[in-house]
């Protein structure tokens, strides 16, 4: 069986090695336009596998290149361009994608982050045929990976990297043996768009559980959750929360206590959050030691009032300058 492997990063790199070890013929790898690292292409080159890097994967010229390679099956492991026809029809056995989401839920991008944010206790790893939708094609196989209460993005990512290449090899074996099942997905599911700059800010009026999940969901290798300390941006890398902690009303974002050697306790919209590791711009990660009464985040009413005061002051100065002139 001749396979063309589209992919990026550790998922694709490990899958490439596992497929080669299983005796599968990899006729080429297709990289992202902007790969996250050089591991995938380096592994392919070391194995003597041709490396392709099209700017637009659906362009007629690249589709012709794929046709000349004559793949039996195309695979996508962490590839970021949407596949259209005629590329979908370029291999007689189809185009299979491997998705770190429990389809039909968690279609789309950054679904590991979103699953943790949504308080899920497991995440799916799904092999499915690619159709003209986004993660809507027939499911071949699906496995689940548990998400523990203290698991961070990195913990879940490592578990997915462990499971996904095994799923790739198993799926290819079933397709080669003509025993691969096809389970049509229902039309309705949930879709998540890519996380963008600005999505990482913490709103201390949210619940402790939501804030805790958000911190661990975008911790390293993610950008980290962010808040304000006066005029400084603070990245919150680690936090802790116990649902048994008291629930009460007070000012969200205010430091209300500390735990020696552990960090500071910050009031949230319903309870508290233990902030354990933070980083200020240009500094190293550290345990915070802010005194009680320190306030995090922005008070928008105060910001607006201060801006209005500055505008009024500038207007007065302009009026004086105009009258003098």
Image (cartoon, rainbow, N blue to C red):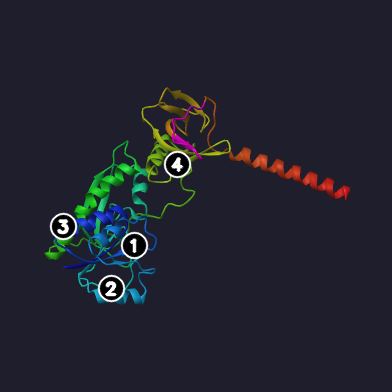
Residue at the disc numbered 4: 225
Label number found at residue 21: 3
Label number found at residue 66: 2
Q: Residue at x 64, y 42 (%)?
A: 304
Answer yes or no: do the residues labelled 4 and 3 have beta carbons within 8 Å?
A: no
Give the spatial CA distance, label 4 vs label 3: 40 Å
Q: How many C-alpha atoms fall within 10 Å of the one at disc 3: few (<14), some, or many (≥20)?
A: few
Q: Nearer the viewer, mark 3 or mark 2?
A: 3
**Quadrant the N terminus occupies:** bottom left
When asked about the image quadrant of residue 12, the answer is: bottom left
Residue at the disc numbered 1: 134
Whether residue 202 is visible? no
Answer yes or no: do the residues labelled 1 and 4 have beta carbons within 8 Å?
A: no
By secondary structure, the bulk of the magenta-drawn segment is best described as: loop
Looking at the image, is mark 4 or mark 3 earlier in the sequence? 3
Q: Is residue 285 magenta?
A: yes
Where are the magenta residues, as a range?
278-290
Looking at the image, is mark 1 or mark 4 earlier in the sequence? 1
Q: How many C-alpha atoms fall within 10 Å of the one at disc 1: few (<14), some, or many (≥20)?
A: few
Q: Give above or below for 99 relative to 247.
A: below
């Amino acid at each position: 069986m001749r396979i063309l492997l589209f992919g990026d990063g550790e998922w694709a790199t490990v899958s490439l090695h596992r497929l080669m070890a299983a005796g599968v013929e990899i006729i080429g790898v297709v990289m992202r336009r902007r790969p996250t690292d050089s591991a995938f292409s380096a592994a392919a080159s070391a194995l003597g596998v041709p490396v392709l890097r099209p700017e637009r994967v659906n362009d007629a010229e690249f589709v012709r290149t794929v046709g000349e390679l004559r793949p039996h099956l195309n695979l996508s492991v962490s590839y970021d361009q949407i596949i259209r026809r005629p590329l979908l029809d370029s291999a007689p056995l189809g185009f299979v994608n491997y998705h770190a989401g429990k389809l039909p839920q968690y279609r789309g991008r950054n679904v590991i982050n979103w699953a943790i944010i949504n308080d899920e206790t497991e995440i799916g790893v799904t092999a499915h045929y690619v159709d003209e939708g986004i993660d809507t094609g027939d499911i071949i196989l699906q496995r689940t990976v548990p998400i523990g209460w203290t698991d961070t993005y990195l913990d879940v990512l490592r578990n997915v990297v462990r499971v996904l290449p095994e799923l790739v090899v198993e799926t290819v074996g079933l397709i080669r043996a003509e025993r691969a099942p096809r389970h049509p997905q229902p039309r309705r599911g949930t879709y998540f768009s890519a996380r963008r700059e600005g999505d990482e800010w913490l709103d201390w009026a949210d619940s402790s559980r939501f804030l805790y999940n958000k911190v661990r969901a975008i911790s390293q290798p993610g950008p980290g959750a962010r808040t304000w300390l006066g005029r400084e941006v603070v990245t919150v890398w680690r936090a802790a929360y116990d649902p048994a902690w008291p629930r009460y009303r007070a000012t969200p974002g205010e430091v209300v206590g500390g735990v020696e050697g552990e960090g500071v306790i910050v009031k949230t919209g319903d309870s508290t959050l233990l902030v354990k590791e933070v980083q200020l711009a240009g500094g190293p990660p550290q345990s915070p030691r802010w005194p009680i009464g320190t306030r995090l985040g922005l008070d928008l009413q105060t910001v607006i009032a201060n801006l209005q005061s500055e505008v009024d002051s500038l207007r007065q100065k302009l009026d004086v300058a105009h009258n003098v002139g």
